[in-house]
Amino acid sequence: MWSVSAHLAMCIRVQGMSGSSYPLLCAASQRAMCMSAAGTVVGGKVEGRKGAAKESTGVKKRGVNERVRSFEEIPHTGRSGWANLVKFWREDRFRTLHKHMERTFNTLGPIYRERLGTQSSVNIMLPIDISELFRSEGLHPQRMTLEPWATHRETRQHSKGVFLKNGVEWRTDRLLLNKEVMMSSSVRRFLPLLDEVARDFSRMLQARVEKKGQGKEGRLSLTIDPSPDLFRFALEASCHVLYGERIGLFSSSPSQESQKFIWAVEKMLATTPPLLYLPPRLLHRIGSPLWIQHATAWDHIFSHAEARIQRGYQRISSSQGGRSKAGAEGGQYTGVLGQLMERGQLSLDLIKANITELMAGGVDTTAVPLQFALFELGRNPEVQERVRQQVRASWAQAGGDPQKALQGAPLLKGTIKETLRLYPVGITVQRYPVRDIVLQNYHVPAGTMVQACLYPLGRSEEVFKDPKRFEPGRWDVSREESERGGREGGGGGGGGGAEGAGFRSLAFGFGARQCVGRRIAENEMQLLLMHILLNFRLSLPSAQDISTKYTLILQPETPPRITFSKL
């Protein structure tokens, strides 16, 4: 029997995310010996069996009389999950898991099986297969439960939010939350709050450029790593929408409490992956240092949320005499917290659980894509100028209305979609089909964990024309239809296909179980980019490409430095 220390030595980083977190258990060495229906993979090369040749597109077509192949015939990366686990740990492949998945698809084709420790999954990447997966997700879609998070809630006797729930209980709570964070009427209420924070960020940056920038008066520039500021922006914006109050992170001396919250979120994210393959309850009982770090981080996150919720509750209670339903009927907006409290349909414990999850999941997953977006706009000046011109025209016509400004500048939304196509925060979206399905002519039993792998999807030539090019305009509706037609008309693809047409952009997930904070995150990022482009020209001090790493989310190996030049 392995000792606990041996288990800890084999801890790994494997998880995926979409908007909020999506767990990922995916991949083994491309160079491992793998047996499949298509042949044997030795040293990364396919030694095919007779009659097992792949289509040039990598898509196995089904002939009229061809039988559906069994689950066991799906190409795989090795039968021993523990051997794969050891190999990944030794080679530190989890940091480049997204790249490994891309290589594995290139070697084995558009579907493969993966065993890692005691976990197993089927991995897919083409929209037509993803479409079939989501059609079989059922009324109560499920993704893999993050056991470290669930164990923390249980041992601390906290209620669970919708991220950790399944079944009827999940659906009931989710429908109530949707009214406050997903519906267009709720977006209209919180959009001005996000716009206020985005404007303040731009003013703060302008003041810094004027104070520290170089160049002639009126043409000052400043080169910085904006990532710390972007994290503060994301937390400030989230707090304003969720709690209905500002926390002052743009001041010259932001509160120590808020800085600790950011630290706690980062520590929680960093300690989650190693716990995925270890028994959290055992680690809790023996007082493992890894578990203590994880639980302490969550405790601080909950403590921060508890203090904010109590203040909000007191504020709302004291004002209810004069306006019992002001927030819901057009009065002063009290934030998501206030709206949920005023409706009274969720218990205070459930409100606390869900607000805390939204806070914890809304900082890194917004701040990191903004780093990538600024980087891509900076190294693509023609694209940047095209987006800026559209933003300027829309802003001039909107009369200060942020919703009208965004509606008139679809390239902003295209910029976010294009950024997340190339750099998905969570690199998989998972589902457990409720019925048997056929993917790439292989039988996949109900209850199998199937993962849509977003990084290889977004960079596939089978799905996107010139996939390495940063082009927000590709998401224009008419252009998108034309591009899909081009991919489908090539005589073999199946990469897009009419059935899979809507499954090329999945950074926020899909359907009833898509990211509950999606509308907040999308608008938050678009508004910040809008105000930055109205006030600054972006450029890069270095033309070097950006390296990425994967821990709990996909992020830059080193945050890019951006030059902000006042317009």
Image (cartoon, rainbow, N blue to C red):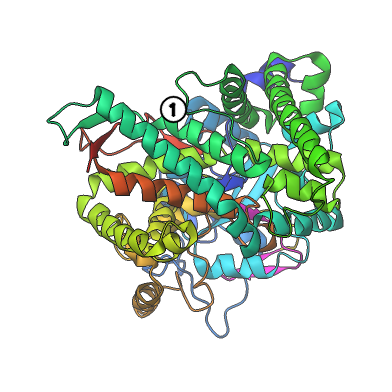
Q: Residues within 10 Å of mark 1 (few under 14, many from 20)?
A: few
Q: Residue at x 72, y 41 (%)?
A: 355
Asked whether the viewer can see residue 57, the reply is: yes
Q: Is residue 246 found left or right of 233 in the rendered image?
A: right
- For the residue pair 187 and 474, the one nearer the viewer reads as 187
User: Splitting the image into 4 quarters, where does residue 205 fall?
Assistant: top left
Q: From the image, tell me which residue sits under label 1.
A: 228
Secondary structure, mark 1, is helix
- For the residue pair 40 and 275, the one nearer the viewer reads as 275
Relative vertical location of residue 51 with respect to residue 550 in this rendering, above or below? below
Relative vertical location of residue 413 with respect to residue 90 in this rendering, above or below? below
Q: Is residue 479 found left or right of 146 in the rendered image?
A: left
Q: Residue at x 36, y 68 (%)?
A: 56
Q: Residue at x 81, y 50 (%)?
A: 342
The quadrant in which the C terminus is found is: top left
- For the residue pair 184 and 432, the one nearer the viewer reads as 184
What's under tag 1, amino acid-wise? Pro
Q: Single out the residue that lies furthest toward the front.
A: 322
Magenta segment: 429-444
Q: Residue at x 84, y 18 (%)?
A: 285
